Image (spheres, rainbow, N blue to C red):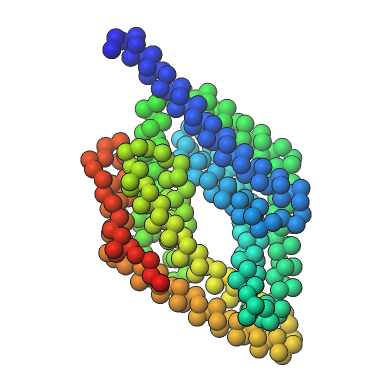
Amino acid sequence: MAAPEMQQSIIDDTETLVADAALTIDRQLQAVAQSLDEIVSHTAATVRQIHRLRISTRRATATLNLYQDWLPAKERLWMRSSLRRIRRAAGEARDMDVLLKRYARKNRRRQRKVFAADCKRERRRAVRRLSRVGKQIVRTGKYTRRQNKLVSAFRTSLITALQIRTGRRENWQETVQNFLRRSHEPTDSLKSLHRLRVKAKGVRYVLELVDIADIQPQRKDALEVLGEIQKQLGTVNDHEVARRFFKLCRKRTSDAKDRKTLKGLIQRERRKRDDAIADFRKWWCPAALESFRAVLVEMIDWDEMPGAVVVDREVLRVVT
């Protein structure tokens, strides 16, 4: 290829990558604004709206992490902080949704009556807090202005295709390394399990943004395992949230019968939580960890992958 043609090819490649990345950043941030605006407009937010909002905040955060090297620090940090506020407020409502759903079966309705009113009241408070956050961030125009600044700064930055690919790979490597460090921690405390769950989510949402043909076999396997980690540790978290909520309800009531029922629910949730932790430890055994670690290490340098390493499904089978 002649020198001018090669130079034009490099320019075209850079323009395409910058345009695609800017569009990704814009769309992910806009998805949060749209989901939050729906909730602000309807005070009785649905379960689906809350769920969609939480997912959109995680994807937007993953996008900012992936392209952080070329985004202005002030706007990026403000946006990350705002996304965290939105996600936490939505998480409080989501916890109550999960609790009400788990006790919706006929054989649990009598127990549900004891705490349902408190649960619904807490959900309404959480949605109101979320609406206030939405009005402060989105309805005032602050969010849109920061979003536009981030996208505009990225589009006009003097970066090359090589810099984008290298930077994305380095940020991906850092995300994986953070997860691997947490994965070797003892799983004997709720805090360590929570940290592992958070890091697994970080890897999962960044990996969903990466669509590299060379890592498709590993990508599919990795997403399945990360999803299972999130599911199992999410179950642990749900039981712990329920246990704490029932303790709070028991403190609030003076009715002897209700207190007795709530005491039984507290004990039940503690047992369920401990069983879920035990199941996770059986599944996330040293052999499973090493199998998954090999896949992630192989995926760290996706531009220089020698061959496909796949998850050992035998050691990562789901415990039932």
Numbered circles on residues, count: 0
Rendered residue at 71%/74% (across/down): 116
Compared with 146, 155 (above or below) is: above
Q: Where, quadrant-wise, is the C terminus in this rendering?
A: bottom left
Q: Position of residue 263 (x, y in %)?
A: 62, 85
Q: Nearer the viewer, residue 215 or 193?
A: 215
Q: Where is residue 229 in the image (x, y as percent from the top left)?
A: 42, 61
Q: Position of residue 39 (x, y in %)?
A: 71, 50
Q: Where is residue 181 in the image (x, y as percent from the top left)?
A: 35, 57
Q: Is 189 left, or right, of 316 in this rendering? A: right
Camera sees residue 173: no
Rendered residue at 61%/51% (across/down): 52
Q: Quadrant of residue 4?
A: top left
Camera sees residue 123: yes
Q: Residue furthest left?
A: 306
Rendered residue at 66%/36% (across/down): 144
Rendered residue at 23%/43% (across/down): 307
Compared with 9, 94 (above or below) is: below
Q: Which of 2 and 151 is in front in this view?
A: 2
Q: In which quarter of the image is residue 285?
A: bottom left
Compared with 235, 257 (above or below) is: below
Q: Where, quadrant-wise, is the N terminus in this rendering?
A: top left
Q: Which residue lies furthest to the front in this view?
A: 106
